[in-house]
Amino acid sequence: MMLAEYRPHHDHEGLVCPRCGKRTVVLHGDSTYVCLDQQCGFRHDVSGNGGGPGGFIAAFFGVIFLFALL
């Protein structure tokens, strides 16, 4: 697998991979962190748009609760 662009999070130190424990995690794109170790394969998207219906339901009940307090 070939990735198009690597942008290290910090130039002086790498992020530690939670899967393999090496300092080989870099930011790929705007919100995806990947491990450079080919045997590890760690990949995590931190974009925050993965709330799904559970997040909507929690927000709905939160608004109802706030109106009940008034």
Image (cartoon, rainbow, N blue to C red):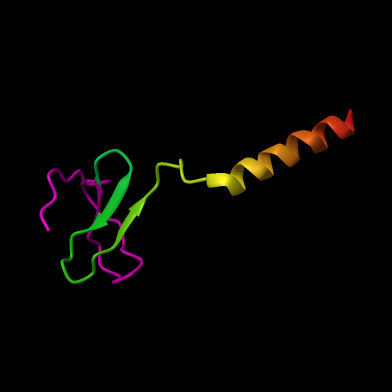
Assess whether residue 67 is covered by the magenta stretch: no
Give x and y (percent) for residue 51.
52, 45
Residue 54: x %, y % from top left: 60, 49
Residue reaching furthest front?
Answer: 53
Of residues 59 and 11, the one drawn nearer to the viewer in this rendering: 59
Magenta stretch: give its range: 1-27
Task: Where is residue 20? Give x, y as percent.
Answer: 28, 72
Q: Indicate the quadrant where residue 7 lies.
A: top left
Is residue 11 shown in magenta? Answer: yes
Q: Is residue 43 above or below residue 7?
A: below
Give the overall secondary structure of the magenta segment. loop
Image quadrant holding the C terminus, namely top right
Q: Is residue 68 left or right of residue 46?
A: right
Viewer-proximal residue among 7 and 69: 69
Q: Is residue 38 left or right of residue 51?
A: left
Left or right placement of residue 55 versus residue 4 in this view? right
For the point 30% across and 51% down, the residue is 33
Determine the residue located farthest toward the top in the rendered image.
70
* Pick the front one: 9 or 55: 55
Question: Where is 63 relative to 31, above or below?
Answer: above
Q: Is residue 66 left or right of residue 14?
A: right
> How many numbered marks are there?
0
Q: Residue at x 88, y 33 (%)?
A: 69
Residue 62 position in % (x across, y down): 74, 39
Residue at x 53% of width, y 46% of height: 52
In the rendered view of the protein, which quadrant contains the N terminus? bottom left
- Quadrant in the rendering for residue 65: top right
Q: Is residue 60 above or below residue 32?
A: above
